[in-house]
Image (cartoon, grey):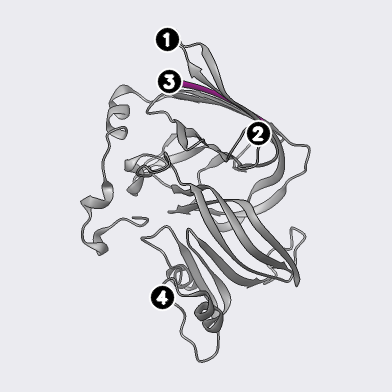
Amino acid sequence: MPVLREIKQFLGKHELMLGNTFIPNKESTPPQGEVPPQDFSKRVLEGFQVTPIWHQGFIRDDGRSKYVPNVQTARWEYSTRPVYGWGDVKSKQLSTAGWLAAFPFFEPHWQICMAGGLSTGWIEWDGERFEFENAPSYSEKNWGGGFPRKWYWIQCNVFSGASGEVSLTAAGGLRKIGLGDTYESPSLIGIHYEGQFFEFVPWTGTVSWDIALWGRWKMSGENKTHLVEIEATTTEPGTALRAPTIEAGLVPACKDTCYGDLRLQLWEKKYDGSKGAMILDATSNMAALEVGGGPWFNGWKGTTVTNEAVNNIVGTPIDVESLFPIPFLKPPGL
């Protein structure tokens, strides 16, 4: 039961925040929710708290990450000014995977809390302090039984060739549906640019992908009004990271780099489906790229399309939170 006990110590079951006290200070009780930074420092010896605008914590190497170069300690405190959530600026924000994703029938659950923001503060990496101001930031929250069987992920907030803030998040995976042995391969592309959100998801169009074992990510999508193409590459070897799995818990199950080369192109869509006026043609050498799960015996290609009945259900604008006015009845995440 120790694993279950550790899980119950996490905060933020019904909020877009997360926190945990691994070791409290002597004669202090662990926080039961978000607390002021000074209070957290007094009460928590090892732990963290993450909210949409504040990130703080201290962790120590416990010897479980021998497979990767590591440091003994990390401490951080920084504030964040959100620029983009997941939707048009000044509009109600959207569920990343549609309103049905609030229910345990679809796992894992995934909500992009902040597609783009600017952070200011510091990080101490093994005692060496790095200070920063208005650094590009991104945050998401995952919860449920485990990550998909296999997946890929692209994220970038640093671009050349465009004015203002641009944010790209694209991902897909092979996930189990319900209690049976049925799997699906959903995928999505989301772009924020000049205050507008361009969403490419199966229930409004098509999304295609061509992902190598490592080193190359290609995706494209279309909806009723726009077309998008993404190509990313890396020559970096990547860093192994632990990820949650249903079978074995938190284990090294994915590989990342934050030094990917990426090109993002976005067009208006003509009446005949061809490319119209170009809206965005931007590049980056700081893209975050990931593959995970498996088995990855070779590359992975595909196109996600859903039938019209599913499109109508998922595309219906439903405020799921209003369906659960009593807090203890809410599914996790709401």
- Under mark 2, the amino acid is Phe
* Disc 4, SS: loop
Of circles 3 and 4, the one toward us is: 3
User: Which is nearer the N-term, disc 3 or disc 4?
Assistant: 4
Residue 144 horizontal side relative to residue 285, left or right: left
| Residue 186 at least partly seen | no
Check if mark 4's residue and mark 2's residue have beta carbons within 8 Å.
no
- Kindly identify which residue carries mark 1: 271
Picture quadrant where residue 219 is located = top right
The quarter holding residue 325 reads bottom left
Q: Amino acid at mark 3?
A: Thr
Decide which of 177, 234 is in the foreground and name it: 234
Few, some or many residues within 10 Å of mark 4 (<14, 14–19, 20+): few
Q: Mark 4: which amino acid? A: Gln
For badge 1, the amino acid type reads Tyr
Residue 249 percent across, percent down from the top left: 54, 58
**Numbered range of the magenta stretch:** 225-231
Q: Residue at x 38, y 62 (%)?
A: 13
- Would residue 69 be seen by someone viewing this image from the given angle? yes
- Residue 166 rendering spot, x and y as whole percentages: 57, 38
Q: Any magenta on residue 7?
A: no
Question: Which quadrant would the C terminus be assigned to in this image?
Answer: bottom left
Q: Would you say 300 lies left or right of 6 here?
A: right
